[in-house]
Image (tube, rainbow, N blue to C red):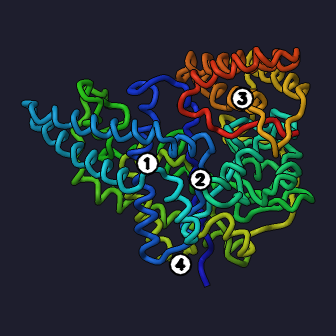
Amino acid sequence: MTRGSFALVLHSHLPWLAHHGSWPVGEEWLYQAWAASYLPVLDVLDELAAEGRTDVLTLGITPVLAAQLDDPHTLAGFATWLGFWQARSEELACERDPMLRELGKYEFTAATDALAAHQRRGALAPSFRRLADAGVLELLGGPATHPFQPLYPDEVVRAGLRIGRDDAMLRWGRRPAGIWAPECGYRPGLEATYAESGVTHFLVDGPTFRHVGADTCAGRTVGESGVVAFARDLDVTYRVWSPRRGYPSDPYYRDFHTYHHGTGFRPARVTSVHTPSDQKAPYDPAAVDAVVARDAADFVSVVTARLDQIAAQRGRPGLVVAAYDTELFGHWWHEGPAWLAAVLRALPEAGVEVTTLAGAQASGHVGAPIELAAGSWGSGKDWRVWTGAPVADMVADNDRLVRTWQKLPASRWDQRDPVADQIAREALLALSSDWAFMVTKDSAAQYARARHDTHHRAFARLADARLAGDESACEAMLSESRDRDGLFAHLDARTIW
């Protein structure tokens, strides 16, 4: 008998990169995450699969990101970016500073390994599909873009889910039963829409359970829907990544925020959270192995202690769910993939069953039905990030867009309608939660507003022409959209109600 079950959920989401501009500025974020997170995490999963391990973790990938990771243009662009990474690292070989020369060697090896991995894998959909087919991971679906679903009517939610799950069917040969609800956003009634859309389980944040007196140690059926909600255990999750401090802040880990301005590489270790960037100590890759092992052992002890506590309180084994952005492992936290591999190997040795959300549901980690209250994983665990005063005008824009969209003639899913496709594409990208998040958090706020405005204007022009019956104007705007969209014009989207 195990001490209990642990489910790790990773969420991969960088949709705001579409139409951001041309490389090296526009796609830099995508390529950094691709090289530092997606490829290393896949390598970890392949190693665990070779050891015969299954049900290792649950992985959500938003359809827009999946499109980027499969697009021929970005595949070629990524290879070019990796080549420039090698070239930039070679520049450091001429530096007088021995620390910079060592950094150059380290970066050149990393770039060469990443290029070899990219040439081996190519588009990433086959790698994810192979691991899912082998039972190594559970793939989560989700809406076509990344809207904060609680703000929109059920028909908009259904449209996004149908498009997203159909896209998953094309890429991975399955419509995922579970979804990552964007921003872990929930409002009462969404579970019924999920049930109608074929969704059997989804993730919320811990306080969404606790606000109604439910513990996170099991999934819960929501009302009479038959759909199961799982919640993050924040006491465990925050051990890694918290609003204040987590493992990545250790003095010996690589510092994310300090750059060598000539090459863009990160030469320093954290040293301390109070040390100015120009005074931080050099990063030493050889010094972090022991720190990774220590932090992995600590996390395992935290999980086992929590499971022992649950078992003592309930009289039976329970469940711990921890969830993070995939980009934490490698991109933001350089040593994250090594830590991840160590934890996933050590947990079973400590008597913990490593599983997925689907596996937890199948194993009976589901408690009595509950009625959930509204929530999210944002600041305050409510909706303020996406509805607060800094973004009130954007919320009003989105409300108007939805009302207009609902007036348009319905399109048939079994017939192509390029105008309806583009209208839906602009609408779904306009409603992305990222624009409000970036404005509220003052993170590239000007860019987020520009993206919000671009999609709203394009939607309005097309919608007005369609409502007026001016199909020639629609065709002219479609041509403009194809020129602007470039990479991601093939994202499958249309009105379906």
**Residue 322 visible in the shown view:** no
Q: Quadrant of the C terminus?
A: top right
Q: Which residue is denoted by mark 4 in the rendering?
A: 351
Label pair 2/3, CB-CB below 8 angstroms: no
Q: In the image, what residue occupies the spot 61% across and 85% down? A: 1
Q: CA distance from mark 1 to mark 2?
A: 15 Å
Whichever of labels 3 and 1 marks the residue nearer the N terminus, that label is 1
Q: In the rendered structure, which amino acid carries the disc numbered 4?
A: Gly
Residue 422's disc is 3
**Which residue in the protein does label 2 denote?**
323
Q: Residues within 10 Å of mark 3 (few under 14, many from 20)?
A: many
**Residue that badge 1 annotates:** 37
Name the amino acid type tagged 3.
Gln
Instruction: State the SS at label 4.
Output: loop
- Calculate the distance from the C-alpha at mark 2 to the C-alpha at mark 3: 33 Å
Q: Amino acid at mark 1?
A: Ser
Disc with the residue nearer the chain's start (1 vs 2): 1
- Closer to viewer: mark 4 or mark 3: 3
Q: Residues within 10 Å of mark 4 (few under 14, many from 20)?
A: some
Q: Nearest the camera: 42 or 210? A: 42
Task: Find out whether the residues at labels 4 and 3 contact each other: C-beta distance under 8 Å.
Answer: no
Residue 13 lies, in percent from the top left, at 57, 42
Q: Is residue 2 left or right of residue 330?
A: right
Crowding around mark 2 (Cα neighbors within 10 Å: few <14, some 14 to 19, many 20+) is many
Which amino acid is tagged 2? Ala
Mark closest to the chain's N terminus, 4 or 1:
1
333 is higher (above) or lower (below) than 286: above
Q: Is residue 272 above or below residue 466?
A: below
